[in-house]
Image (spheres, rainbow, N blue to C red):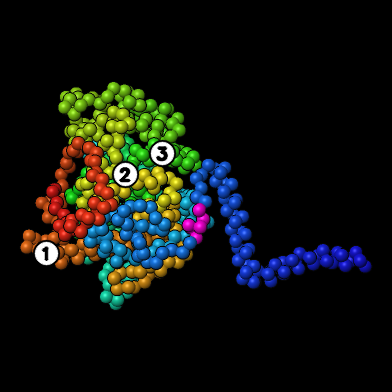
Amino acid sequence: MASFVWDYLLWLGPSLLLLLLYLALRRPRIRGWTRLAVRAASWRLWVIICVILELPLDRNIRAWTREPKSPGEDILSGSGQASDGHRLICKPTALAKYLLHHCGSLARPRLASWPKGDPHLQTLSSLLCGQQGHRLQFTRDNLFLRDGGIVALDWAVGTRLDEVVGRRRWEGRREHQSGGKSLGCFTATPPVLLLIPESWGGMTPHLKLLCHQAMRLGFYVVVFHARGTAGCPLTTARLTEFGDPADLEQAVAYVHNRHPSSVMVAVSEGSGSGILLSYLGECGSSSYLTAAAAISPVLQGQLWFETAMPSIYRWGVLFHRKLQLSRYASSFRGVLDVDRALSCSSLRDLEESLSCSSAQLQQRTPSPPISSRKSRLSTGSHSSQGLAPSVAWSLGERAYPAKDWDNYWERNEPLRDADEVAVPVLCIRSRDDPLLPPASSLPLPLFLSNPYFLLVLTDRGGHCGFTLEGREEMEGGRDGNEVEEKGNWSHIAVLEYFRVVADFLKREERDGVSSDGPRGEYSRSRTSDVAPPRRRRANMIRKQRLETPEESSVDAEEEEKNFTWKRSYTR
């Protein structure tokens, strides 16, 4: 009998334990203790994984879980010093104040906390995996360039076009009834959003989500793929250098010709900011873009290549680039030491072996001075990589490999012509980005002195992550409407930024009329819709005059009285 009772208790014991555990978890205090214990155990396990994978670890969880500041509290920074929470670092211009007042997404981002907000989990999720419920289809245009190369332009076409059209009609009715305005456009035609992926090419889930969100808001979405990436055929023996905007300039002109009456804006992802910022600097006021944004941008290219990246990310990027190079290995063997490039173990060595004559097989002598290049072009020298003399002349010094590593960055540093930028540029960056140099190396004087550059610096977000903590209610336009959004905060902020900037410039164009003429920045006066190709001017790094916070605050009010957002076109 005793054995029977004992066997019965052993059989019933697990069920009793589960029942007691269920009753205990119904009590709020015990449920809270259990949640903390599971969270602590998960964190310790994640620490072990990060140590094994040699990933940098942010142990300050308290900063990740504290309550956010109230909307707009201490967001505008005039000093550029790091602070808790998010911060908009910029020159206090009329545009910056207008953004703070009308762009609700910049005022109160509620970014996800750990574990969903871990920088590595966000980064890997944005680069490798993501939501695939809304699959997009693309139609491709292969654009032939002046030097015979090809870049690809992928136009996004949704598989649920009826849903997109219905959404746009619903939003139009809603905004019309509320007295608001449609997405910032100067014309009745939809705006064009140009997306620039990472420099190693390909469409990440992060970029696909941005495509889908922009299509829902009524954008024409086109993705720029550099030569030799994302299945784009490589027809020349030269790759796109990190900060060479020549291909992008021709692509922007082509898109403008297809939609001449549409406003065009651009967003770069990660290292794709290299050619976007270079394009804005080289084109200046002649750019067809109305505004631009860069999510997790590489602002200092040389520093990015020379800064050690965590091994898991470095090997992933190297594998992707070497895979592209091996596809055209036989074509490059005449001008590159392909075997040396494929054996590189760092991004710097790989970039130097591909782009610098000091590391190439048949070009170990320095490039000739500009005065002697005309004679070499007439003889069809091999150093111009088989280009026709007229094409090599139009490309200028870029028809030749850079002499060495320092010379490469003299002509490719993204911010080398920052003082020529004539459109507002919003940069979104997190302090815990594992792929970029530390936030302490950011060129803050540029944002504090240049009215066209704005930087949103957040505590967390990873690289192109910025995941929201569930559903986020964000203030809409100036009428105070609230729009419920879910997903990626950087997408919401960038698209709302474009709308607010367009509204600001429209207001400046409408109201800013003085005796000297229109004060609006984008009152365009062109002699022709299509500008002829212009010769590349000599690229020089312009030294920004570093202003102290005191000088910036003293001169801000006086300069704001004289500064206007007028934009004069030189083409």
| Amino acid type of the residue that numbered disc 2 sits on in the rendered structure | Gly
**Is label 2 in a helix, a strand or a loop?**
helix
Residue 90 showing in the rendered view: yes
Q: Residue at x 50, y 53 (%)?
A: 60
| Amino acid type of the residue that numbered disc 3 sits on in the rendered structure | Thr
How far separated are the C-alphas under marks 2 and 3?
Answer: 16 Å
Question: What is the x, y in percent for residue 185?
Answer: 24, 63
The residue where tag 1 is placed is: 513
Q: Quadrant of residue 1?
A: bottom right
Few, some or many residues within 10 Å of mark 3 (<14, 14–19, 20+):
some
Residue 337 or 431: which is nearer the viewer? 431
Q: Nearer the viewer, mark 2 or mark 3?
A: 3
| Amino acid type of the residue that numbered disc 1 sits on in the rendered structure | Val
Q: Residue at x 34, y 38 (%)?
A: 302
Please give the range of residues in magenta: 60-65
The residue where tag 2 is placed is: 274
The residue where tag 3 is placed is: 307
Tell me whether circle 2 and circle 3 mark residues in contact (CB < 8 Å). Answer: no
Q: Is residue 452 left or right of residue 476?
A: left
How far separated are the C-alphas under marks 2 and 1?
Answer: 36 Å
Question: What is the x, y in percent for residue 290?
Answer: 23, 56
